[in-house]
Amino acid sequence: MMKQFGVIGLGRFGRSVANALVERGFEVLAIDRDERCVKDLEGKATVSLVLNALDEKALRDAGVADLDCVIVAIGDSIEDSIMVTMVLKSLGVKYIVAKAQDDLHGKILARIGADRVIYPERDMGIRLAESLAAPKIFDVIELSTTHGIVETPLPKRFVGKTLGEAKLREKYHVSVIAIKRKAPYMTKEGTPELKEEVIIAPGADDELIEGDVLVILGAYTDIDKLTGK
């Protein structure tokens, strides 16, 4: 069954999240009290509503309680962010993701029931610094709102096949740019251990084994088809 998401707060971050979810084929209920923000998503989000997210009855009537996940993307008011999270918790929303401005804000959100707290500005800064200091090809890299480089466990139906036999490019229109796997080796002390092995630009004859992690380049919709999401 298709997952249904809600996004409350349609500033730059909220709009970006809503658009990305829609482009990946999910149903999205977009909410903001500012009509101009809502209009920006009309025709894109499954449903766009102008309403006060502090109004528990209005959220219930909109069907928010039945969503699989709600993202609280309010960025201009810490108090509203906290209050909306509390309202969602009281509605019994299954999974709440809340955007925090700083550590204290994040701790409060977690304490009142947010299942996941994110720090977009801080995390983006950290990722930028890490990529500049030591680029890692295996980070999940968003190339656009529709395409990216993603790590995913090897689906069981491909175990034992070669890349050529799996025909991932022909069937799913994705490219495997690397394979990560745990390879056994002996330590200096003579004990067996596992270390990560990376196969860069694997060929058609490379065999896929259980436990492999594929690093895939492609459209998110195609990657989801491959992984069965």
Image (tube, rainbow, N blue to C red):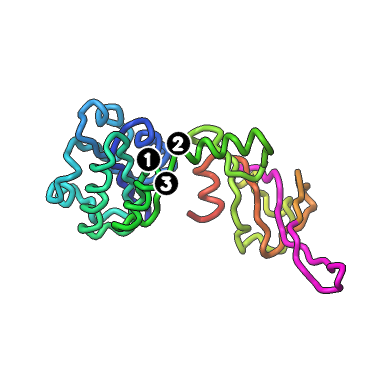
Q: Residue at x 67, y 41 (%)?
A: 137
Q: For the magenta stretch, what is the residue range?
A: 174-196
Residue 24 position, x and y percent, is 44, 42
Could you tell me which secondary element the residue under label 2 belongs to? Answer: helix
Q: State if disc 1 and disc 2 touch (CB < 8 Å).
A: yes
Residue 118 position, x and y percent, is 42, 46
Position of residue 214 relative to residue 14, above or below, is below
Task: Point out the frontmost of discs 1 and 3.
Answer: 1
Q: What is the number of the mark on residue 101?
A: 1
Could you tell me which secondary element the residue under label 1 belongs to? Answer: loop
Neighbor class of circle 1 (other Cα within 10 Å; few <14, some 14-19, many 20+) is some
Q: Amino acid at mark 1?
A: Gln
Left-right relation of 61 to 122: left
Left-right relation of 126 to 31: right
Q: Residue furthest front?
A: 104
Q: Amino acid at mark 2?
A: Glu
**Gap in Å between the C-alphas at discs 3 and 2?**
9 Å
Residue 155 position, x and y percent, is 60, 59
**Total numbered labels placed on residues in the image:** 3
Name the one closer to the observer, 92 or 188. Answer: 188
Left-right relation of 176 to 204: left
Q: Residue at x 57, y 34 (%)?
A: 128
Left-right relation of 98 to 199: left
